[in-house]
Amino acid sequence: MVKFMRPIAAGLVAIVIAAGVACSSNAAPAPGGPTPAANNSGSAAVQTNTRPSTNAQDLSTADLVKLAEPSIVRIATGGGVGTGFVVADDGYIMTNNHVVQPTVGSRGSAASAIKVTLSDGSVVDAKIIGVDARADLALIKIEQTGLKALKIGNLDSTVVGQDVVAIGFALDLKMGEGPSFSVTRGIISAKNRAITEGAAILGAIQTDAAINHGNSGGPLLNLSGEVVGVNTAIAPDNSTGGIAPGIGFAVGADTVKAVYDEIRASGKVNRGLLGIQNFDSLRPARAKELGLSTDQRGVLLNDASVVAGQPAAAGGLKANDVITKISDYVIRTEGDLAVALIKNHAGDRVTVEFYRDGKKSSTQVTLGTPTT
């Protein structure tokens, strides 16, 4: 799995992690590491609409920027500058965990202030409501009401090749008209990538819309004005020691929604641990080999997927099983798996449905607690 770079901006500092993110601060990006980017969250329930938006719904880039502008904020901490966006009109803002992390002390107390600059230029203090380091997301709040929130889309209605726009405070550039954020446009290059920041962020979106230091935490928008991802990382080019052009990543909308719901409700994400690794989305050729319909979807367990002594092993899951449902959540991709484990908590006893030898089966699994 490729290691990515996080871009934050406060001069120009890049934090290297196992998945890419984009923030701006005072240091040059480290070779081979990720750079922090952008994030947004809005609606509470994960949508399941499978129809991509039509051309009739699409806005011009200029109209999209005008629509989004009141929702985009600059986030400054002692460690740099990143981006965020309003997800609820009563002051809730989504961003990356790595954007606000410099403000958290060793005991979790605020070590320095978080300053949020709104689109009209006003600067207000923000507090952290909760963070989820595994998804590199954070929810913060300002004491404001009547704000304009962006709507969170979903991965099912996001298609490869679709036009998207990234908005954020790239390099924290000064002067110019308006709120000083930068706008870049590109396409969805791939869906359901996994980017690694210590733990894998599943269900990520790859885009060629330019993402730079300072974009961390900002929204990746479709042309209907929906947030399809939170810009969080850029890929290094290990052959040159630089940054790979046109390969940026955003935390997918489904994960953003799930994390937002959990933090808004309880201030934290208490995701469950299934105890599997090195799994894949089921592809048609492999489905046929396993005696399944070629249109069957799910997560395929490989020879080294089931970790000994972990919940999946205790529940009897094994190599070549295809997981299709956890509790009430249908599993079609790795991204669906990530959402199911956010919504089902450590200690929960869940029903896992799967196919084995072409036959549908189920087992009861008590979810564990992730160690990171």
Image (cartoon, helix red, strand yellow):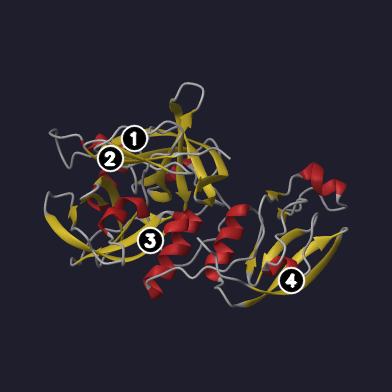
For residue 42, the mark is 3
Q: Are dots 1 and 3 in contact, CB under 8 Å?
A: no
Kindly identify the residue that appears in the image at 66 percent across and 60 percent down.
Answer: 331
Is residue 29 or residue 142 the one in the foreground?
A: 29
- Disc with the residue nearer the chain's start (1 vs 4): 1
Report the residue marked by disc 2. 24
Picture quarter containing residue 28? top left
User: Left or right: 200 with respect to 185?
Assistant: right
Q: How crowded is the residue under tag 3: few (<14 C-alpha within 10 Å), some, or many (20+)?
A: many
Q: Distance between the residues labelled 1 and 4?
A: 44 Å
Report the residue marked by disc 1. 212
Where in the figure is residue 258, as x and y percent of width and height? 48, 64
Q: Are dots 4 and 2 in contact, CB under 8 Å?
A: no
User: Left or right: 73 with respect to 303?
Assistant: left
- Disc with the residue nearer the chain's start (4 vs 2): 2
Q: Distance between the residues labelled 4 and 2?
A: 44 Å
- Disc with the residue nearer the chain's start (2 vs 1): 2
Kindly identify the residue that appears in the image at 52 percent across and 66 percent down.
Answer: 342
Q: Label 1's element?
A: loop
For residue 314, the mark is 4
Q: How far apart are marks 1 and 3 (CA)?
A: 24 Å
Residue 222 seen by the camera? no
Picture quarter containing residue 90? bottom left
- Disc with the residue nearer the chain's start (1 vs 3): 3
Where in the figure is residue 366, as x and y percent of width and height? 65, 75
Q: What residue type is labelled 4?
A: Ala
Kindly identify the residue that appears in the image at 37 percent across and 48 percent down.
Answer: 225
Q: Are dots 2 and 1 in contact, CB under 8 Å?
A: yes
Mark 1 or mark 3, whichever is nearer to me: 1
Is residue 232 or residue 258 the one in the foreground?
A: 232
Image quadrant occupied by the N terminus: top right
Kindly identify the residue that appears in the image at 54 percent across and 37 percent down.
Answer: 2
